[in-house]
Amino acid sequence: MENQQPTQTTYIGTGEVSNVRTFVASVFSYMTMALVISGVMAWWFGNNMELFGSLRDLYTGKPTILGWVVMLAPLGLVFLMGGMVERLSSATLLAVFIAYSALTGMSLSYIFVVYDLTAIIRTFFLTAGVFGIMAIAGYTTKTDLTKLGNILFIGLIGILLASLVNIFWPNGTMSWLISVIGVIVFTGLTAYDMQKIKRMGEVVASGTETAQKMALMGALSLYLDFINLFLMLLRLFGRRD
């Protein structure tokens, strides 16, 4: 799901414009940190049956009470970051982001049980390649991607609704279609969010509390794009154990 970024970008502290590359580098640093945390937690829980069993019943595969908490808590943390960004300090926002990354990693541990490790690694690098190309496109294009972002957001809502229906009435064709549309949506959102982040860097004052908060919210956007793109590609091309 697309994150909620602060809409107010005009409270710039000292009024000095930050270096865009420095701001973007900060965003990617936070994003990389989050991906590493999620990856470590997913691998740890996915390769330890005792830990994995605390999240999912090993016989039925259904989530335990803790498993439901781990799956639903990240959604609450995303809303917390988006809704309270102006009230939370940058240090608190960072702590919430780290907690979100860890919980998301735990909830993704199932991929190490369901999918072949080679498929996971191959899909990760495929995701990184597609993500990198679209991030560069979003950073360098002169075309305003705002209208595209609005269309993609509608597509995202459609994916969420279709996924919810597919949970109660599972259908293989529907799952495949959701994954295909998901790849298109999150590929486009990567470019859109990258352009949005670049524009943030052009107006936010370097070294301020606001700059760090904006960088964290930008990192959350790209992190969500990457994770969701990875999962959609894994469902399409991943080989199950």
Image (cartoon, rainbow, N blue to C red):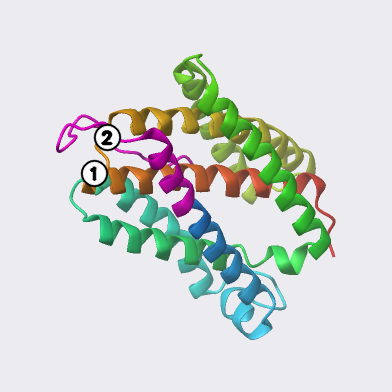
Tell me which label, 2 or 1, sits earlier in the chain. 2
> Seen in the image, is 209 located left or right of residue 103?
left
Q: Quadrant of the C terminus?
A: bottom right
Q: CA distance from mark 2 to mark 1?
A: 7 Å
Query: Which residue lies most toward the top here?
Result: 143
The residue lying toward the viewer, choosing from 226 and 33, is 33
Is 26 in the magenta? yes
Q: Quadrant of residue 118?
A: bottom right
**Image position, residue 120 (x, y; %):** 75, 58
Residue at 34% from the left image edge and 49% from the top image edge? 79
What kind of secondary structure does the magenta stretch mostly adopt?
A: loop
Query: Which residue lies most toward the bottom here?
Result: 50
Query: Which class describes the residues within 10 Å of circle 1: few (<14), some (14-19), or many (20+)?
Result: many
Residue at 79% from the left image edge and 64% from the top image edge? 117
Is 18 in the magenta? yes
The residue lying toward the viewer, choosing from 188 and 241, is 188
The disc label shown at residue 210, or none: 1
The amino acid marked with disc number 1 is: Thr
The answer to whether 118 is drawn above or below residue 205 in the figure is below
Q: Quadrant of residue 164?
A: top right
> Seen in the image, is 125 located left or right of residue 4?
right
The disc label shown at residue 204, or none: 2
The residue lying toward the viewer, choosing from 97 and 182, is 97
Q: Which residues are magenta?
A: 1-30
> Dots 2 and 1: beta carbons under 8 Å?
yes
Question: Tag 2, which secondary structure?
Answer: loop
The amino acid marked with disc number 2 is: Val
Residue at 73% from the left image edge and 49% from the top image edge? 125
